[in-house]
Amino acid sequence: MAEITCVLDACSIINLIHIDEDDFLLKKLKGIDFYLCEEVFKEVEGNVFSKLGKASDDGFSIKKRKYEIDETLKFYRRCQVSNDRITHEFKNDFFDHVNRISGYKKKNGEFYSACLALFVSRFKPVQSGSIITTKVFFHTDDAPARDAFRNFFINQQIGHIEDTADLLVLLYRLEDSDTFNEKDLERYLSSLFQEYALEVTLLKRKLKAIREGFSLAQRKKEDLVRNIQDLIYKLDNLDFKSISIHYEYFKRNKKHHSNLWDVVNSYRSVFDLESNTSDLLAKVKMLTKEIPNIYRL
């Protein structure tokens, strides 16, 4: 096993599951030491199947794929670290303390993943039975979470925050060319790009259909028209900066526009692409071009 420690977020695990239909990547993951928190596993269980209905109308293939995913989840379930385990070592007020020192007010999967990363960086058990300190890679495709926790990871000297594309490159770098070659990495990066782009395309298509079906009264609501048109324009141009403004607008007005809110909320992963510091889709393209320049032993 490589001396590399990772914490995985729900969005990264879900994306890995959907691009890895032959368990190729799952076998590679077993070569690194990685963890996930119990909230993340709950999020994975609750969301990993939602894409199946979006991607195919073939009931038999969906049923088969659901069975395969259920089997994969058994592996991830074994890698959980419970909140009780953390508070047993770090006292009951640990999570409240991290709330204060991180400045992050939500208690979601990203928050508990950051807590787990801090815990593992200070309290990693090893086979000898002793405890060591280590640096941790936290992999998440939630760009707002990466931005929010970046300084926390630096200040606490936890390690690095990266995304699923970085994890794919790491798994590639750790293997030799016979077990994970350039074509393999190119294929998985391409599949990852398609996972991101598919959600964007489907959301955009549904928003356009709703806009075209607006009643006369809806067309007269300037803020409604502006928000849906601006969001469609940004999705058309793969511009994810500040798209959470539109998400929050539809959330605030869900009683009046429930159909819009249902659509927007079902594609929450698209809004996770928002970032002021990076463009995940552009990054995947860049990494694909750089594959021949990745140094391997």
Image (cartoon, rainbow, N blue to C red):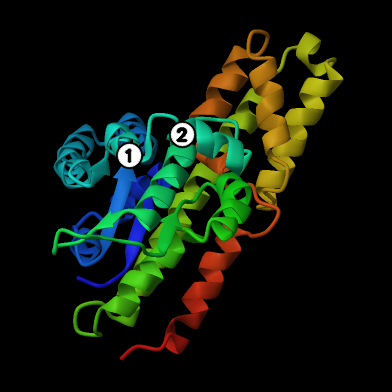
Q: Quadrant of residue 83?
A: top left
Q: Depth check: give the residue in front, 92 or 51.
A: 92
Q: Depth check: give the residue in front, 163 or 149.
A: 149
Q: Position of residue 33 (x, y in %)?
A: 26, 61
Q: How far is disc 1 from disc 2 in space, using C-alphas?
A: 9 Å
Residue 37 located left or right of residue 139: left
Image mark for residue 86 = 1
Image mark for residue 29 = none
Q: Position of residue 193 (x, y in %)?
A: 47, 59
Residue under numbered circle 2: 95
Q: Amino acid at mark 1?
A: Ile
Q: Is residue 239 visible?
A: yes
Q: Quadrant of residue 26?
A: bottom left
Q: Secondary structure at mark 2?
A: helix
Q: Residues within 10 Å of mark 1 (few under 14, many from 20)?
A: some
Against 237, is 203 above or below? above
Q: Amino acid at mark 2?
A: Phe
Q: Residues within 10 Å of mark 2 (few under 14, many from 20)?
A: some
Q: Residue at x 24, y 62 (%)?
A: 29
Q: How many marks?
A: 2
Residue 147 located left or right of residue 224: left
Q: Position of residue 19 (x, y in %)?
A: 32, 55
Q: On the rendered image, what quadrant is the N terminus found in?
A: bottom left
